[in-house]
Amino acid sequence: MFGMSVKTEDTTHKVKEAADTATFRNFGHAAASIRKDAQSTIERSAGPSPAGTPPHTRRGLIKNAITFFADKEGAVIGPRFSRAGTAGEAHEFGGEYKGGNFPERSFMEPALERQAPRFASSFGGSIHE
């Protein structure tokens, strides 16, 4: 007659914690790279940029207002309202701002498009012991 004993241990919580940590780290890196890319396209200049190109900044407000927040659920990247008001929205999407009609001068969406190919590779192999 044979006797057998089996002991199991549930370690799924360790896998979930590792996945959450890696996701948080990867979203943070992705958001930071998008922010840096967007900032690098905004130039200081006294005159406006041509329609369809990233905006110019006089004093650096819109460039310095771009920030990000990342957690394990995702990331939010863009100009802070407290620093740039509604100027970021007017530039990104076009529209009325301070009594004038602004043409679209996107800077966040093109930055996302340029950085997107890096995201998939940054998540691959990020959970390991």
Image (tube, rainbow, N blue to C red):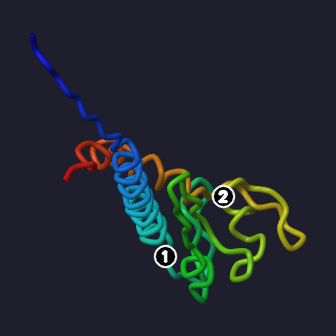
Residue denoted by label 2: 92
Judged from the image, the secondary structure of the residue bearing numbered disc 1 is strand
Residue type, mark 2 in image: Glu
Residue in front for this viewpoint, 47 or 63: 63
First in sequence, mark 2 or 1: give its number. Answer: 1
Where, by quadrant of the figure, is residue 120 drawn? top left
Q: Secondary structure at mark 2?
A: helix
Mark 2, other Cα within 10 Å: few <14 / some 14–19 / many ≥20? many
Looking at the image, is 111 positioned above or below residue 124? below
**Residue nearest the viewer, comparing 79 with 98:** 79
Front residue of 40/22: it is 22
Q: Residue 117, image x and y in percent?
A: 34, 43
Tell me the residue at 43%/53% (across/down). Answer: 20
Q: CA distance from mark 2 to mark 1?
A: 15 Å
Q: Quadrant of residue 50?
A: bottom right
Which residue reaches farthest top?
1
Placement of 85 over or under 16, stated as above or below: below
Question: What residue type is disc 1 on?
Answer: Glu
Q: What residue did someone put label 1 on?
A: 43
**Residues packed near mark 1 inside 10 Å, few (<14), some (14 to 19) or many (20 plus):** some
66 vs 13, left or right, is right
**What residue lies at 74% left-to-right and 62% top-to-bottom?**
90
Task: Residue at 49% x, 76% y: name it.
Answer: 43
The spot of residue 56 in percent (x, y) is 57, 74
Task: Find residue 10 and report its horizontal and vertical position in percent.
Answer: 35, 40
Q: Looking at the image, which residue sits at the far bottom?
A: 59
Provide residue 125's location: percent of width, then percent of height.
23, 45
